[in-house]
RNA sequence: GGAGAGGUGCUCGAGUGGUUGAAGAGGUACGCCUGGAAAGCGUAUAUACGGUGUGGAAUCGUAUCGAGAGUUCGAAUCUCUUCCUCUCCGCCA
C-alpha cells in the first residue's frame, strides 16, 4: 500500500495520478487525511498521558521504598483517572488506525509517469516485437488437438482425478514440461538469480504481504483446517522471504528465482479463453523476483524485461512486449510490461509473462526495508516477473512448430528434452 | 499424536514486580594508541509512531523482551490464550 506520509503530503498529486488508473481517489484520500490528523492528535494525547502515568508510578515506587505508605496510597488514587484516559485514548487510536488501514488497502498503487492512459487491453502500447509468425500447412491444428494426437496431455483424465483445469501430462508432454522448467531455471541462474524452492502453501500473513489478501481471497485455494493457502504464484512465498527484513544496502539488488506449481481458482471463466492450456487451475511457472534500491529499480525492470526477451527469442517464438495502460495494470503495480507470444493455430496472442515494478507498494506492506551508509532505513522496491509461465508457451510451441511429420523442438531446448521432434 | 523444556537486542547470554531499551560478552563501525599491525583503551551500534526543530542535524516523549489478552500504581519478570522451537516416545516418504 501507499505510505500514509506520501498520501498526506501529496494529496493533489496522488489523486491526479490515481485517475490514470481510472480510480477516483477524491473521497477516500480526504478520509485518509482526516483520520490521519485524528490519529496524530490522539497519539500525542496518549503519549503525554502515558508519560504522566509513568512518572507517577515511579514516584509511588520511591514512596514505598522509603516506607511512606500513606503518601503512596494517596498517590495511587490519582492513577485511576489516568488509567481510564489511557484506555480510552488507546482504544480510539487503535480504532483510528484500523479504519486508516482499511482505507489504505483499497487505494491502488500510483502508475509510473510512462504508463499510457487507457481503460482496456486495447489501449496497451506495443513496445517492440520480434520473431516470425510461421505459415502453417493445410490441416494444422490447435494445441488441444495436437496434444491428443501425440498423446501429450490428457485433459479428460485430469477431470476424472481432480476436475477441469488440472491436465495430466504424459510421455513427451511431461518431458517437455520438465525440460522447460530446467531451461528457465538454468537461464535465470546464468543471469544472476539465486534459485530457491519455496513452500507451495502459505499462511495468511504472507497472503497479506504480497496483496492477495484480503481483496483477492477467492482466487486462492484455501485449506481451512490449517488456514493455509495454495500459492497462485511463487511470487508470494519468495517475496515474503523478505517480509519484516531490513537488508543492507550493499546486498541490493537481491535476485531470486523459483520454480513452483501455481494454483488459481479463476472462478467464473468459461469459453474459448479456457480451452486447452489457455487457462488452468494448476500450472507450472518459473518466477524471477528482485528487491531493489529505489534509485535504480527502473534499471532493474529494464534488465528483467530484456532478460525475458532472451527467453522467447531462444524459444524461437513470435513475441511482442506491451506496456500496459493504466486501466489494464494490476492494483499493486506501478509499471508493467506483458509478454505475449503468438499462437498461430488459435490466431491470437497469448500472455506468457508479466514483469512489474511495484516500487514500495508491496514493500510497505511487507515492511521490507534497507539501510545504507547514511544509517537511514527506507523501503525497498520490489519487482517480479514470470520467466516464464509454461502452459501457453507449450501451446505456442506445439502450434507454431507443427509440421506434417511432427512437432519440432527449438534448438535451445533439445539438450533439455533429449528429443528433437514429437511424432 | 503423547510427555517435558524453552522463546530476551546483529549473535551469545543475564535478568521472578519498581529509573531495565534491557547487565555482561562477542561481532561491527569510528576514534586513540603504533613505523605498520595485533593487543589495549574510548565511543557508538534496534524499530515504529508522535512532539519541538534543522541546510544536513539534533532532541524529547510513547510503544515494543515470540504474538494477543489480563492482574497491578508499576510486568521481560505473575495469570490465561495462541504461535513457534528443542528433547524423548509413537507414526511415517
Image (tube, rainbow, N blue to C red):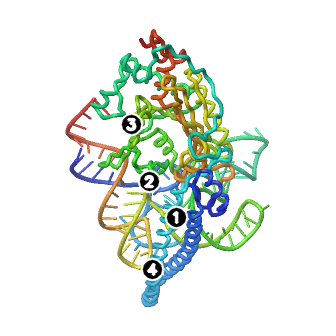
| Figure check: A153 above or below A58 | above
The residue shown at (60%, 30%) is A320
Q: Quadrant of residue B77?
A: bottom left
Is disc 2 placed on a helix, strand or loop? loop
Check disc 1: other Cα within 10 Å, few if <14, some if 14-19, many if 20+: many
Is disc 1 placed on a helix, strand or loop? helix
- Residue position for label 3: A281
- The subunit carrying tag 1 is A
- The subunit carrying tag 4 is A
Marks 4 and 3, how far apart at CA: 54 Å
Question: Residue A333's spot in the image, x, y percent?
Answer: 57, 46
Q: Which mark is residue A414?
A: none
Question: Residue A305's spot in the image, x, y percent?
Answer: 61, 33
- Residue position for label 2: A214
Instruction: Tell me which label, 2 or 4, sits earlier in the chain.
Output: 4
Q: Are marks 4 and 3 in contact (CB under 8 Å)?
A: no
Question: Residue A8's spot in the image, x, y percent?
Answer: 63, 63
Nearer to us: label 3 or label 1: 3
Question: Residue A285's spot in the image, x, y percent?
Answer: 47, 32
Q: Which residue is more in the foreground, A64 or A410? A: A410
Check disc 4: other Cα within 10 Å, few if <14, some if 14-19, many if 20+: some
Instruction: Tell me which label, 3 or 1, sits earlier in the chain.
Output: 1
- Residue position for label 4: A83
- Residue position for label 1: A100
The residue shown at (60%, 38%) is A337
Is disc 3 placed on a helix, strand or loop? loop
Is disc 4 placed on a helix, strand or loop? helix
Q: Quadrant of residue A422?
A: top left
Amino acid at each position: 500500500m501507499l505510505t500514509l506520509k506520501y498520501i498526506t503530503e501529496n494529496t493533489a498529486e496522488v489523486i491526479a495520478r490515481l485517475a490514470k488508473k481510472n480510480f477516483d481517489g477524491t473521497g477516500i484520500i480526504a478520509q485518509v487525511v482526516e483520520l490521519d490528523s485524528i490519529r496524530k492528535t490522539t497519539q500525542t494525547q496518549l503519549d503525554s498521558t502515558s508519560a504522566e502515568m509513568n512518572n507517577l508510578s515511579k514516584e509511588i515506587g520511591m514512596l514505598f521504598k522509603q516506607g511512606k505508605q500513606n503518601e503512596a496510597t494517596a498517590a495511587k488514587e490519582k492513577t485511576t483517572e489516568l488509567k481510564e484516559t489511557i484506555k480510552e485514548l488507546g482504544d480510539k487510536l487503535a480504532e483510528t488506525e484500523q479504519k486508516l488501514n482499511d482505507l489504505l488497502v483499497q487505494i491502488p498503487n500510483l502508475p509510473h509517469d510512462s504508463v499510457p492512459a487507457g481503460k482496456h487491453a486495447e489501449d496497451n502500447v506495443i513496445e517492440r516485437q520480434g520473431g516470425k509468425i510461421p505459415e502453417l500447412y493445410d490441416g494444422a491444428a490447435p494445441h488441444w488437438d495436437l496434444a491428443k494426437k501425440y498423446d501429450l496431455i490428457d485433459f479428460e483424465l485430469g477431470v476424472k482425478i481432480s476436475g477441469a483445469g488440472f491436465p495430466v501430462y504424459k510421455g513427451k508432454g511431461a518431458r517437455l514440461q520438465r525440460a522447460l522448467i530446467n531451461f528457465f531455471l538454468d537461464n535465470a541462474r546464468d543471469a544472476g538469480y539465486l534459485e530457491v524452492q519455496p513452500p507451495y502453501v502459505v499462511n495468511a500473513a504472507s497472503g497479506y504481504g504480497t496483496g492477495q489478501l484480503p481483496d483477492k481471497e477467492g482466487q486462492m485455494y484455501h485449506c481451512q483446517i490449517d488456514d493455509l493457502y495454495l500459492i497462485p504464484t511463487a511470487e508470494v512465498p519468495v517475496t515474503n522471504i523478505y517480509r519484516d527484513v531490513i537488508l543492507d544496502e550493499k546486498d541490493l539488488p537481491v535476485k531470486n528465482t523459483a520454480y513452483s506449481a501455481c494454483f488459481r481458482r479463476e472462478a467464473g471463466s468459461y469459453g474459448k479463453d479456457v480451452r486447452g492450456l489457455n487457462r488452468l487451475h494448476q500450472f507450472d511457472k518459473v518466477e524471477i523476483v528482485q528487491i531493489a534500491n529505489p534509485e535504480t529499480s527502473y534499471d532493474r525492470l529494464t534488465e528483467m524485461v530484456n532478460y525475458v526477451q532472451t527467453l522467447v527469442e531462444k524459444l524461437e517464438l513470435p513475441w511482442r512486449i506491451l506496456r500496459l495502460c493504466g486501466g489494464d495494470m494490476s492494483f499493486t503495480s506501478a509499471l508493467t510490461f506483458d509478454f505475449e507470444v503468438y499462437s498461430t493455430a488459435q490466431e491470437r496472442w497469448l500472455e506468457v509473462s508479466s514483469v512489474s515494478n511495484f516500487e514500495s507498494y508491496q514493500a510497505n506492506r511487507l515492511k521490507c526495508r534497507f539501510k545504507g551508509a547514511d544509517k537511514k532505513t527506507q523501503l525497498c522496491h520490489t519487482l517480479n516477473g514470470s520467466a516464464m509461465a509454461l502452459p501457453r508457451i507449450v501451446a505456442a510451441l506445439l502450434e507454431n512448430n507443427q509440421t506434417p511429420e511432427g512437432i519440432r523442438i527449438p534448438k535451445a531446448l533439445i539438450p533439455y528434452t533429449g528429443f528433437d521432434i514429437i511424432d
